[in-house]
Image (cartoon, rainbow, N blue to C red):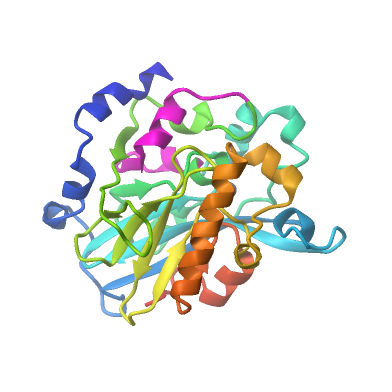
Amino acid sequence: MKTLSLAKSLAYAISVAALLFTGVVAAQDAPSPSAGRPRVGFSIIKTGKVAVAERLLLPEGSLSKKIDTNFSAFLIKHNDDYLLFDTGLGANIEAQYARDMPYWARLAFKFDKPLLPARKQLEDAGYVPIQKVIISHGHWDHASGVPDFPEAQIFAAEEEMHSIAHPESGAATAWPSQVAAPETRWSPLVMQPVAYKGYAQSLDLFNDGSVVLVPMPGHTAGSIGMFVTVDSGKAYFFIGDVAWKKAAVAVGAAKFWAASVIVDRDREQTHRSVEQVRAVTQKYPDLVVVPAHDAAVQDALGYFPNWVR
Ligand SMILES: [Zn+2]
């Protein structure tokens, strides 16, 4: 893990992220915006799924009923710039799992035979390599595709990068097979003291309010969420793993308690982050909450190459 060059990255941390996401990026070899693509929009790249007991996802859910949960990457388009929020299951998920998933956790955390990884789906659709990947947090089902994007700068909250560099034991930690490659170019995201939709801190990636990150600590130290306001004016809130189902936010209880014990680093803080999401949805009733794994929400929005615009 020492090879992560965290110290090097942190040295030029402050505001680097914000700069990278402004004008400069237009010079890169991003695909010209083809007709049919939105100015600001997103597309959900489904890379895998698994059916789990509803109770695991919803505190009041059924123990016998199984529902699908997705492993997805989210492609965000802003003018000529493209970025990926989370990676879903990557090209080497099976080898990563064999190497790094603790044996005791394998019954609880699994996946069906993976679909095509995000990298492959993007390539097949003619997209040039993505230059920016942001992970909501460092867990295996979000960072699996990090090694698939060697051209990209990989962004995570600075608090998350610290825990990636100093992993704790257990299932709920970043995996060396995904995050420790010395060639991976990490960049910390530094939240700014700018209030946004009730959050005290935020990071406006393009300085126009259309793609804004906010801290959502608890599930991991540096979990982040992302607001995207698309061409239609509709706003979407990607909440990572703070809650696994949209319905769980509404009742203010994010996960079945036993699951929360395993996966949430700080349950109290996670609860506060859920309450904050709930407060935002009450204040902005038109906001669409998109949990990283909620298949029902994602089915309704459609999948890559379709755009939500
Ligand atoms: Zn997850």
Residue under the image location 78 percent in, 62 percent down:
60
Task: Judge by depth and name the residue closer to the eye, 218 or 244.
Answer: 218
Indicate the quadrant where residue 12 lies.
top left
Q: Is residue 259 left or right of residue 180?
A: right
Q: Position of residue 134 (x, y in %)?
A: 37, 48
Spot occupied by residue 230 in the image (x, y as percentages of width and height): 33, 74
Q: Quadrant of residue 2?
A: top left
In the figure, 116 relative to 309: above or below?
above
Say which quadrant the N terminus sits in. Answer: top left
* 13 in relation to 308, above or below: above
> Could one spot residue 23 in this view of the protein?
yes
Q: Residue at x 19, y 42 (%)?
A: 15
The picture places residue 257, in percent across and down from the top left corner, at 73, 47
Residue 20 vertical position relative to residue 126 in the rendered view, above or below: above
Q: Quadrant of the C terminus?
A: bottom left
| 208 versus 105 height, above or below | below
Q: How many numbered discs? A: 0
Residue 253 place in picture, x, y as percent: 66, 57
Between 44 and 240, the one nearer to me in the picture = 240
Chain part drawn in magenta? 144-169
